[in-house]
Image: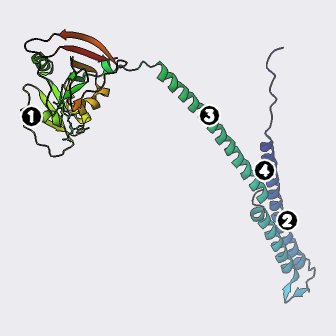
Amino acid sequence: MFGKKKQQPQIDKEQLELIENAQKRIKQKKRLYAHFVLFLIGCVLLIVANTVLGIGKDFTIAGINWFVYAILIWLFLFIYHLFNVFITHKFMGKAWEQKQLEKLVAKQQARIDTLKEGLKKEEELQAKSEVFDEMNTPKPNLKTTKNSQLTIIVAAAENNAIGKGNQLIWHLGDDLKRFKALTSGHHIIMGRKTFESFPKPLPNRTHVVITRQTDYKVPLGVIVVNSLEDAIDASRGDKQPFIIGGGEIYKQALPIADKIELTRVHESFEADAFFPEIDPKVWKETHNTFHQKDANHDYEFSFITYERM
Ligand SMILES: NC(=O)c1ccc[n+]([C@@H]2O[C@H](COP(=O)([O-])OP(=O)(O)OC[C@H]3O[C@@H](n4cnc5c(N)ncnc54)[C@H](OP(=O)(O)O)[C@@H]3O)[C@@H](O)[C@H]2O)c1
């Protein structure tokens, strides 16, 4: 009762048309063949009638027997028939050919439209799956995927002052010791001005100096680069390259650094070089040690470590 309705075999309308046309064509050829046979028999009969039976024996035109003219006229008619079948109505006529061509074009167009539709759906699906993947793939954690930790090391006053006249503003022995302990054995990346503030390169560290000058001369072993990116690239083998200043370089490096080792000097100073503001929404304080003023240190200061959140 609920079975599928049996499909009635249907002959395609176009197929039917094709069959009909093919049958017509066969008939045309058969008629031509019959005409040819009739023509041959007719020729023989005409010749026999004239030459054997003597019909119209005396009827000649320009000295040629009448049956020759009769055969020539028939031959002309046969050639016309032949021409009609094979040339004029090559197949089923020009109009029929044109119609078939139009049908073919329409069919191809329909197929193109279907393919386009399919492609559109596929693209939509792909886009959806990409969005899905994007939403569900865990974001790579910069800190864990990067094999080095770019660290800024700086001593900054309460007003973020770091230097004046290309010199440090204070002398804090413990800060210099800490700087030495942390940076020894590592790459230290600096601006050209900071490099020039040293009497000579610091021992046991690879100096990477950033300058826009193309012919900047440095002592043997010092690396010169023309951008911060190149400086980081030059420090690739180092697990913890340090950005050591000054103000211009700190400003450019802060957005890409992973860690800050800050010595906060608890005073404000007049200066011409400054450290940028540390955004507490971006940086988390992970360590803080306070140091009192003493005989060797004119100011109170704190060693503070920040890590990018
Ligand atoms: N308190 C601290 O912890 C601390 C640490 C370091 C330095 N400092 C102080 O900071 C001051 C120096 O800082 P500063 O800001 O004047 O100079 P700087 O940052 O040391 O150097 C600036 C120079 O670096 C080069 N440079 C900067 N950005 C560049 C880029 N994107 N591409 C190529 N080259 C680039 C330029 O060199 P060219 O002009 O040759 O092209 C520029 O003149 C000094 O007073 C120093 O004592 C303080």
Mark 2 crowdedness (10 Å alpha carbons): few <14, some 14-19, many ≥20: few
CB under 8 Å between discs 3 and 2: no
Instruction: Measure how far apart labels 1 and 2 are at the Cα level.
Output: 112 Å
> Badge 4 is on which residue?
22
Label 2: element kind = helix
Q: Nearer the viewer, mark 1 or mark 2?
A: 1
Residue 32 image position (x, y, % from top left)? 81, 61
Relative to 271, is 197 on the left or the right? left
**Label 4 CB, ligand 1: below 8 Å?**
no
Q: Residue at x 84, y 76 (%)?
A: 73
Instruction: Measure how far apart labels 4 and 2 are at the Cα level.
Output: 24 Å
Tag 2: residue type? Answer: Leu
Tag 4: residue type? Answer: Ala
CB under 8 Å between discs 4 and 2: no
Relative to 110, is 11 on the left or the right? right
Ligand 1 quadrant in view: top left
> Badge 1 is on which residue?
221
Relative to 53, is 295 on the left or the right? left
Instruction: Measure how far apart labels 3 and 2 are at the Cα level.
Output: 61 Å
Residue placed most toward the observer, 118 or 288? 288
Mark 3 crowdedness (10 Å alpha carbons): few <14, some 14-19, many ≥20: few
> Badge 2 is on which residue?
38
> Badge 3 is on which residue?
118
Tag 1: residue type? Answer: Gly
Q: Earlier in the sequence, mark 4 or mark 3?
A: 4
Residue placed most toward the observer, 180 or 35? 180
Residue placed most toward the observer, 137 or 96? 137
Q: Nearer the viewer, mark 3 or mark 2?
A: 3
Label 4: element kind = helix
Label 3: element kind = helix
In the rendered image, the vertical position of residue 208 relative to residue 177, given as above or below: below
